[in-house]
Image: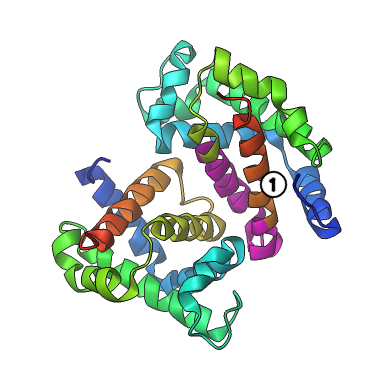
Amino acid sequence: MVAWSDQERATITGLWGKMDIGDIGPQALRRLLIVYPWTQRHFSSFGNLSSIPDIMSNAKVAAHGKVVMGGLENAVQNMDSMKTAYAKLSVMHSEKLHVDPDNFRLLAECITICVAAKFGCSVFTPSVQQTWQKFLAVVVSALGRQYH
Amino acid sequence: MTSLTARDKTTVKAFWNKISGHGPMIGQDALTRMLAVYPQTKTYFAHWKDQSPTSESAKKHGMTVMGGVADAVTKIDDLSGGLLGLSELHAFTLRVDPSNFKILAHNIMVVMAIMFPVDFTPEVHVAMDKFLAALARALAEKYR
């Protein structure tokens, strides 16, 4: 089980409270598909992803980005039991969606870049970055947990 | 992994032109974040009196490293040839595990996103990610 200090909990809930998932989610998913284009393999039903402008203007990408980012709410509410909280989603990503779990790590990096750009250096300090990345690493691990 | 396209190189050079004045600051912040967020990287700096992320040694080293990145931008057409000396240094003297190049690259890009949220577009992001990966490959070339 992961240990969280009071400071870390406060950092995560504070940051999450300020986060606009409708803004960060789409941005992060767009970056994933652009910076790591092999991740597009999961989105053949999303229509035109053939160029950067196409990805940036794709409505399905934006909608899905919001869904994925919204999924982090579960993590914020269940920081002490993420493995359990994400068990079903993990099975789904493995058995139904067949997503390489390394892609979760790539999306986490893109989310971090977007969060950094949004909050700037006064909020997203090295210490906050450390806590945020620890948080995302636990989510990534929980999502990969049920793969076999 | 792929090599840099002409477009990647143009994108990197254009972005670098905009930000190069801030190079030292970017380097300092990136190294501080690397040491804070990935404490295992401190193992390479056991010789510093003060290994804390905000130490003078850390800031100074951040600037040194970023100077190397700046130089690499000017040698973007031949990173292996242009960085031969640095490559040998990393292979035979420093022996930094190559996984750490990716860690530092990530922190450099986090700082770029913080300092230039409008200019660090997804297009610049992918070009910069590819460039820093190519730079890392050039640095690790002589390892074995």
The part of the chain drawn in magenta is A106-130
Look at mark 1 in the image and give the residue it sits on: A135
Q: Name the quadrant of the C terminus of chain A.
A: top right
Secondary structure character of the magenta stretch overall: helix
Residue A114, quarter of the rendered image: top right
* Residue B68: image location, x then y, percent: 32, 71
* Residue B104: image location, x then y, percent: 45, 61
Residue at the spot 71% in from the left edge and 29% down from the top edge: A70
Residue at the spot 29% in from the left edge and 58% down from the top edge: B135
Residue A108, quarter of the rendered image: top right
Looking at the picture, does residue A106 appear above or below residue B13? above
Residue A48, quarter of the rendered image: top left
Decide if residue A45 is on the left or right side of residue B68. right
| Residue at far right of view | A6
* Chain of the residue under label 1: A
Dot 1: within a 10 Å radius of its alpha carbon, few (fewer than 14), some, or many (20 or more) residues? many
Residue at the spot 71% in from the left edge and 28% down from the top edge: A86
Q: Is residue A58 visible to us here? A: yes
Q: Name the quadrant of the N terminus of chain A.
A: top right
A8, A82: nearer the viewer: A82
The amino acid at mark 1 is Phe
* Residue A146: image location, x then y, percent: 63, 25
Please say which color scheme the image uses.
rainbow
Indicate the secondary structure of the residue bearing disc 1. Answer: helix
Decide if residue A54 is on the left or right side of residue A71. left
User: Is residue A116 highlighted in magenta?
Assistant: yes
User: Is residue A13 highlighted in magenta?
Assistant: no
* Residue B19: image location, x then y, percent: 41, 64
